Image (spheres, helix red, strand yellow):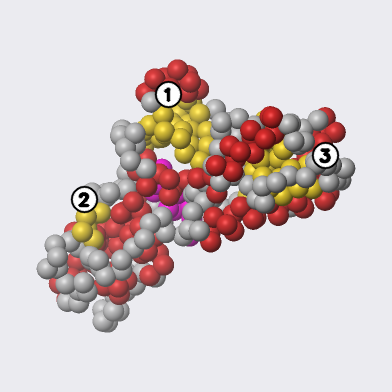
Amino acid sequence: MPSSKRYLVVSADLDKSRHARLHAACVGLREQGIEIDLQAWSDRPAHLLVTGTETSLSRNAVEQAMRRGIPVLRIGRLPWDPDSVHSVDINIEAGELGRSLRERLRHGRDDAEANGTSAAGALPFVQHLLSAPKGLYLFESGLFRLVADLGASRMHMIRRMPYPELVAEAMSPNWFITALTQKQYVEKYRQDVTQSYSLESLLWDIAIAHDAPLAQVDPLRPLQLRGWPLMPSTALPTQWLLPLGCLLRGPWSLPALAEATATPHAELKRLFAVALATGLAEAAPAAMPAHRQGGSSELGLIRRLARRFGLNFLGAGSGQ
């Protein structure tokens, strides 16, 4: 996972001198692992608004930003009445401006975490994906854009959004989502689609690439797979193959499966989470015990599954 963080910063009512210093400050932050996409103020969501002097343009931009929860940094000379607007001197140098930018971006993120929300609707890509109702959505992170059709379970990649970059940035909290109509998608975005992917295969790729589980997992809730993931076995982590085979045969709770297959709990959490996120897993009946004891017949089945996947499995009590 990349160590850099990407933000969208918009500006309004800046003269050439202040805009040049803002651009230089953004370049300086790039060397610190903070990627900033600097654009003019628009209706698009953003992580920070940088505005200039008190004119009708800047006043309107600030009012809109405050309503949408976007932090504001003002470069100007006149006093500014809203307490939430942080002002710096009109002659501030690029280095100091960069520090102010970094502080305001962190301030917005800290406020969002304290309130249990994300500034301006920014959330991890996966969280947006799993919480949005069925429909068409535009996903944005900096310069990157893509469209998700949650009704058809397809992800449409738009120019400048490479698939590996999407997988790498999927857990970053810098994504915005906007609902689209079919007409908006056809007229504004469909012509720029470069490739489309199944959401199921995308979620498996994301789960494989990241250590954090994609969703919450109740370890005592037995799960069973409806079918094999929409992924070739060679693309899956080797340590997942045996647990997947077991889950195809019947329901297992996480502790029971960890004990029976000698698989670390952390790996099974990732596996259970992506199975739940993709809808590939179904809960076992309520009467199913949460923890299964592996008898000799069950261990024999697990060994046969292990051999099928080319694994050398030594189960507990196997005597090998």
Q: Can you see residue 234?
A: no
Is 189 located above or below residue 169 in the figure? Answer: above
- Contact, mark 3 vs mark 2 (Cβ under 8 Å): no
> Mark 3 or mark 2, which has the lower sequence index?
3
Q: Which mark is residue 21?
A: 3
State the image coordinates of residue 291 (x, y, percent, origin top left).
22, 74
Q: Can you see residue 154?
A: yes
- What residue lies at 37% left-to-right and 43% top-to-bottom? 132
> Mark 3 or mark 1, which has the lower sequence index?
3
- What residue lies at 40% left-to-right and 64% top-to-bottom? 267
Q: Amino acid at mark 1?
A: Tyr
Principal SS element in the magenta part?
helix
- What quarter of the picture does the C terminus occupy? bottom left
State the image coordinates of residue 244 (x, y, percent, origin top left).
29, 58
**In the image, is 288 to the left or to the right of 90?**
left
Q: CA distance from mark 2 to mark 1?
A: 33 Å
Residue bearing mark 1: 185
Q: Amino acid at mark 2?
A: Arg
**In the image, is 27 to the left or to the right of 251?**
right
Q: Secondary structure at mark 1?
A: helix
Residue bearing mark 2: 226
Count neighbours of disc 3 (C-alpha within 10 A) and say few if under 14, some if 14 to 19, many if 20 or more.
Answer: some
Residue interval drawn in magenta: 201-211
> Mark 2 or mark 1, which has the lower sequence index?
1
